[in-house]
Amino acid sequence: MNQEKEIIEFEDLFKTDRPQQKPNVERPDQKKKYTQSILAYLLVMLLGASFLILLLGNVSALQKTYTENELILENIAYDVNGIAILNEAQYLEIHDPYDDFVIGVDTYLGYVILVNSGNTYYESVLFMTDDLTGETILNVDVITGIFTDASITTWDNNSLEINIYAGKSQILPLFFAADYYEVEGPITDFSDFGTSLLNFLVYLMLLPIIVILLKIDFVGDFNDFKVKKDQWLPIIAIGYVYILLGNVISNYASGFLGDLLGLAPAEAINQMVIIRALNSSGVIFMVLSAVIMGPIVEELVFRKSIFGLIKSDKIALIVSAILFGSIHLIGEDSIVVALINGISYFVMGFVFGYIYLKNNKNIIAPMAVHILSNLISIVALLFFY
């Protein structure tokens, strides 16, 4: 069966009359290169990254020592259901780098109550309306129910469990008697700048390897794409429309799945790493990795190589989407959390694969849309987040 008939003709809604393009059919002699490129990607991502971590792990300029109080904020930043309290003076000393991810919602007896910025329930749970003044005030009974007698254990009165964090050496107030996750510090780890540089170096290793392995396909697709100069804008514009539709679908799916499984959607760890890197002195390294190097490498590996090895386009589309999503969610705490927080990556993988197929397997099309999508996201994070 013709490969083009395997894909739903959704783009027919936008199609104008134009000459048929010659399908870009993968050559059998390239299958070895496709396999090598996938293996190279995995080896560099695992072994190459591990080597760089060992090599740069003792470079003081790339490290940061996190105090126990900072680690409390780190845990709240990564746990949408988390809550903690911190002495107000101590909080004011360290809160600035965490303001995008952690909210100091109010103070109680000299302690700031901290929740994740993605928590959509804290206002209705922690606050009440004063009957006399009509003002919104902290509900002391709820604070007691959370931190003292543990009579309140969920955010939504159902299944979103409240996770309490406190430091091992933290001086806790007398009202604090609930069980909690213990945080121990200090800990020395890569700084946001170090993480940004590390990510850049990994892609700097990957880019020439993947491009050299797939040079024939890359150059051939580029030359074919050059011929269609008058179609570049429509191809990229329609592709980005697919991305926007994918975002709508993934946001709805994340919310639905979160409600179903009792977990609130939050920022994926991969996204948080990007945001923090963009707010560090290593911003240029993250921009280069996310906007240029990453899309080139990922499209060649997850689209060109995977579709080149799998005969069925439908199966290749699914496999590439799953692998593309999974590689971006390695740092998540569990499979369930990864699925809820990172469903957008799976949807994006599917969209890029669809764009690849709709453009006769010319890798430049999804690569260009991928670059544009990441560029717009990075600009939004830099100037509007």
Image (tube, rainbow, N blue to C red):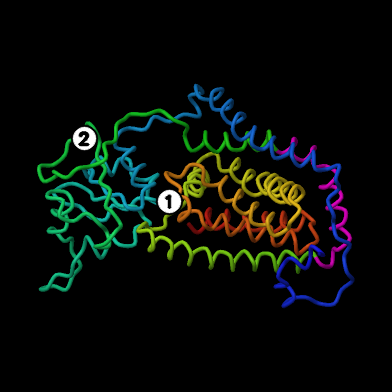
* Residue at disc 1, secondary structure: helix
Residue 106 covered by magenta stretch:
no
Horizontal side of residue 297 vs 58, given as left or right? right
**Residue at 74% of width from left, 35% of height from top?**
209
Vertical placement of 4 versus 205: above or below? below
Q: Where residue 86 sits in the image (x, y, percent)?
A: 23, 43
**Residue at 80% of width from left, 43% of height from top?**
31
Horizontal side of residue 242 vs 185, given as left or right? right
Residue 224 covered by magenta stretch:
yes
Q: Mark 1: give few (<14), some (14-19) or many (20+) Cα within 10 Å.
A: some
**Residue at 77% of width from left, 55% of height from top?**
364
Tag 2 residue:
170
Vertical placement of 194 versus 150: above or below? above
Vertical placement of 185 versus 231: above or below? above
Q: Where residue 233 sits in the image (x, y, percent)?
A: 76, 66
Q: Residue furthest front?
A: 1
Q: Where residue 25 sits in the image (x, y, percent)?
A: 85, 54
For the stretch drawn in magenta, what is the main secondary structure? helix
Who is closer to the viewer here, 109 or 236? 236
The alpha-carbon separation of the residues under discs 2 and 1 comes to 29 Å
Who is closer to the viewer here, 48 or 385? 48
Q: Are marks 2 and 1 in contact (CB under 8 Å)?
A: no
Sequence-wise, the earlier of marks 2 and 1 is 2
Rendered image quadrant of residue 321: bottom right
Amino acid type assigned to the residue bearing label 2 in the image: Gln
In the image, which disc is placed on residue 337?
1
Magenta residues (range): 207-231
Amino acid type assigned to the residue bearing label 1 in the image: Val
